[in-house]
Structures are given as structure tokens and as C-alpha cells.
Image: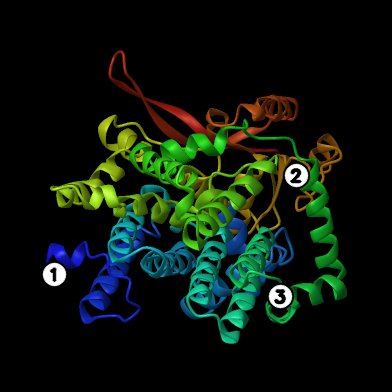
Amino acid sequence: MNLKYFFSASTTSKLSKKEIILIFSVFIIAFIIRIYELGDLGFNNDEAIYSGQAASLANYSEYQNQFSIFRAHPLLLQFMISISFYIFGISEFTARIIPVLLSCGIIVISYFIAKYLYNRQTAILSSIILSFLPYHVIISKQVLVDVSMSFFFTLDLLLIVLYYRSPTILLLYGIGITTGLCFLSKEIGIISFIISIISIIIINKKIKIKNILIVILSFVFVTSPYWVSFLTLEEARKSVLEYIDWQDSRPANHDTIYYFDILLSDILGYVLSLLVVIAYLSIIFNKRNWNFRNIIIPFLWILLPLIFYQMISVKGYHFPFLITPFLVIFGISILSSQWIKKMSRKYILLIIIIPLILISNKYTINEYFLLIPHNPVLGSESLTYMKDVALWIKENTSKDSTFITLYTHMANIIKFYAQRDSIAIQANNNPAYQKIENIDMLILAEKINYIVYEKIQLDNGKFLENKALKLEDYVQKYDGIPVYVKYQNNSNIENTKTLSEPAIIVYEFT
């Protein structure tokens, strides 16, 4: 495969043998990168919840006692994982393999989006970058509903692009179905339905009731299980309404520039962020090139979701995963501009742009250049300490024991790995968690048998300090006895000594 083919500006729909081999190779590379050490780390908080729900759906009774099927989100990803659990058994690997396959699918779909919108050069470069992009790899390896939502969001855009090229009724049905599956992955996937309707109106250059009705009916049909359960099952309806009310009342967890900060440093990196800015500026200042490709995609499918996330008070590190493929494609597309084509050494620029983008990412800078572990936000990383503690609890405590923890993360991990009742003292009024009225009475009545004090959480969550003091007070007041301590090693830079400090302490009330 020579450079001429690699950097071809071809936009033909026909797939050549070379191109099929290329796409398959990118898929395999992406899969290998994501499957490496896939099951080595324990689940984080969200992973434990979704995997617990999947185990409940797969009819594992020990998990049904700990994880309610109806919680915050629809159950499409959990259902897919439940099939994996049913066939291959419960493990981190069998849970995470589903998001990995979906994320590799996102890369393949993104290839065709880039090819049909721009050219083969943009498709190849963007798919390779997406395969190696640290942020995309890390989120892909976690059991998060955002991964399945992003898969169908990306597939939806591909169908919109195909509809623009050749509008057919069949594609309208496909758009309605994929927007429905996007919603069934996570409620905020409804934005794909809204953007799709707007895109179809712009493509048709007028409101065609029949076309819009096909999309709406397809969407309603696919999402009908969600609406039926909402209307007929009190548990499902109560869970959804309580969750909506809770989300509306939650205070902001990050400042207003949070997404712009992580987009620049963690997600895209400095070089790719610069290309995205240049691409937007070239559109704004070149009105003659305003068309479907340069307006609908960059502004509807990138900016609208970003604005939507920005308006929500609670911001998540994994939320921008939804738009990452489009940002990569859009940024790389500027390298197909006329002024680039006129460069005598453009091949050199196009070849070195991939490593430049990857090494300008904060993950790469911290991990490989500064040798600093990069834990971006509380709950987004796996803490092996928590899994180890939960496994000790499973082996050394009775099945009817009840635990109180500092934060919900530890509580959910105990529920998943140890199948023990666990209550968090800090639950942020989340309706999915049990309300604690009087901890003193529960301890005195022997309804709480252990305290699990995860001191390691205080390093990333200063908001837990007041609750930690309360937890320490209960230990002192009721003579909690430390029965297990999980240590973490900290290096002292000044004297190069390695110090062991308690990461998590388990106290027993006798």
C-alpha cells in the first residue's frame, strides 16, 4: 500500500480490496490496544453498578439482592453485558469486552463518515488517531453506558450522511431506530433524535411531515420497552422520576470551563485542538464554502451536544466521549485543504501529524515524559485497593453482615464483589441509595457490623472530609476494632524512601 493510496483524496463509495484490508487492520489494532490487560483492574463505581445490573438481568440471584434493575438509566448496555455474563460467566473481562467491541465499531463507522464527508485521506488518518487516542482507549475499556450511546450516536450520523448523499425511506427508518437505541443506552441520547430531525429538515430544505413521521414512529417503536415499563411498573416510574428530581437539584461539581480544559489537555491534546480551532475559523471566515458538510456536522453534531453538556450542572469526564470521533475527523479534515495540497512536502506533514497529536496529549506527557500517574477525576479510575478489600470481606465475613462506607464507590464495589449489604455515609441524596436516618441506633442495634474507611478517597475528594470525620467519630465512640488494613505505598521524594500508609481500613463492632 503506497503513500499515494494512503493519502488519496478519493471519496468513491466503492470499497476496494486494499481499503477493506486497511479498515480490518485498523479494527484489529484498536481491538488489541483495548483488550490488553482488560480484566486486570477491578471495577470502578459506575462499572460495578452497571455490571451488577447486568448480573441481575442474567438471573444471578446474589446480585439481584444488591442491584436493582431499575436505577438511573435504561438498560441496553446492561442487557448486552448480561448475555456475555450468561454465556461466559461474570468477570471484569466478560463485562468490558462489550464496550471494547462497541468502541472498535465506532472507529470503523467513523472511517466511513470521514470518507463520505471528506476523503479517504481524512478517513485513514482520523481512524488511526482514534485507535490510539489515550482518552478514547481508556473510556472504551470501562463498562459505561456512554460507550453504547456513542456507538449508536455515531451510527446515526453515518445514516444521516448517507441520507444526504441518497435520501431514501429505508434510511429514515434506520435513523429512527438508531436514535431509539441511543436513547435506550442513556436518556440524554434523546439529543441524537433532536439533531437528526433538524438535519433531515435542512437536507430536505423544508419540513416533510411524512419523513419526520417515519423517524418519530421508528424511534417510538424501538424505545417502547422503556415507555411501557415506565407506565406499567411503579418501581421503574418511581426510579426515573426520583432520578430526574435529584439531577435537577444537584450542585455543580466542576467550573464552567471544565470541558474546554479537558478537551484541550486530556481528550484531543494540544496539536489536535489547534487543528479543530483552525477548522472552525476556516468555516466562519469562508462563507462561500458553507454547505451540509461544513455546517451541519461541525455545528449540529459537535457543538450542540457540547452546549447541552455544558448547560447541565453536573459534568462528567466521560461525557465528551460522545463527540470525540467527530472532533478528530473535523480537526484532521483541515489537512485536506487546498493550501495543504499545494505544499511540496505535504506527505512529511501528514505522516508526522499522527505521532505529534498523540504525544501532545496530557496522558502521554504525564505518564511517559513526566512519569506522573494521571488520575483525571474521582471515580473514573479503577482502584485495586477497593477490589482487594471487597474480596477480603467476601472471604472473612458472614453473608448477613452490613457495612457502612465513606462513599458510594466503596459501597457498590463491596456489593458487587462481596455481595454484602453496604451503605454509604456520603450518598449526595442519590435516590438509588438507602437513606441513613440514625447511624448510632443502627450500630447499637447491631444492624451495622463493620465500618469501611477508604482514606484513599480523600486524596481526590476533599468534599468527603467532613463525612470522614464523622466516620472516625463512630469508630472511636463504639470501639471499632481494625480487622483488615489495605496499605498503599507512597514515595518520599526528599529521602527516596517508600512509605506505606493505610489506604482502606475495615473496623468491626463487637
Q: Secondary structure at mark 2?
A: loop
Among numbered discs 3 and 2, the one appearing first in the sequence: 3
Closer to the camera in the image, 32 or 104: 104
Q: Residue furthest front?
A: 288
- The quarter of the rendered structure image containing the N terminus is bottom left
Please identify the quarter of the rendering in which residue 103 is found.
bottom left
Amino acid found under the numbered disc labelled 3: Thr
Q: Residues within 10 Å of mark 2 (few under 14, many from 20)?
A: many
Residue 448 is marked as 2
For label 3, the residue is 223
Name above or below for residue 480 compared with residue 138: above
Q: CA distance from mark 2 to mark 1?
A: 66 Å
Q: Residue 71 at x, y = what percent?
A: 73, 60
Mark count: 3
Q: CA distance from mark 3 to mark 2?
A: 41 Å
The crowding category of the residue bearing disc 3, from other C-alpha atoms within 10 Å (few below 14, some 14 to 19, many at least 20), is some
Quarter of the image holding residue 22? bottom left
Which numbered disc, 1 or 3, marks the residue that appears first in the sequence?
Answer: 1
For the question of whether residue 59 can be seen, the reply is no
Q: Which residue is mark 1?
A: 1
Asked if disc 1 and disc 3 are in contact, CB closer than 8 Å, the reply is: no
Identify the residue at horizontal 69%, vertical 68% (top origin). 64
Q: Where's residue 155, x and y in %?
A: 51, 70
* Quadrant of the rendered image containing residue 121: bottom left
| Residue 50 in the figure: left or right of residue 87 | right
Q: Secondary structure at mark 3?
A: helix
Going by the image, does 490 lie left or right of 495? right
Q: In percent of the image, x 52 and y 37: which residue is there? A: 260
**Viewport quadrant of the C terminus:** top right
The type of residue carrying mark 2 is: Ile
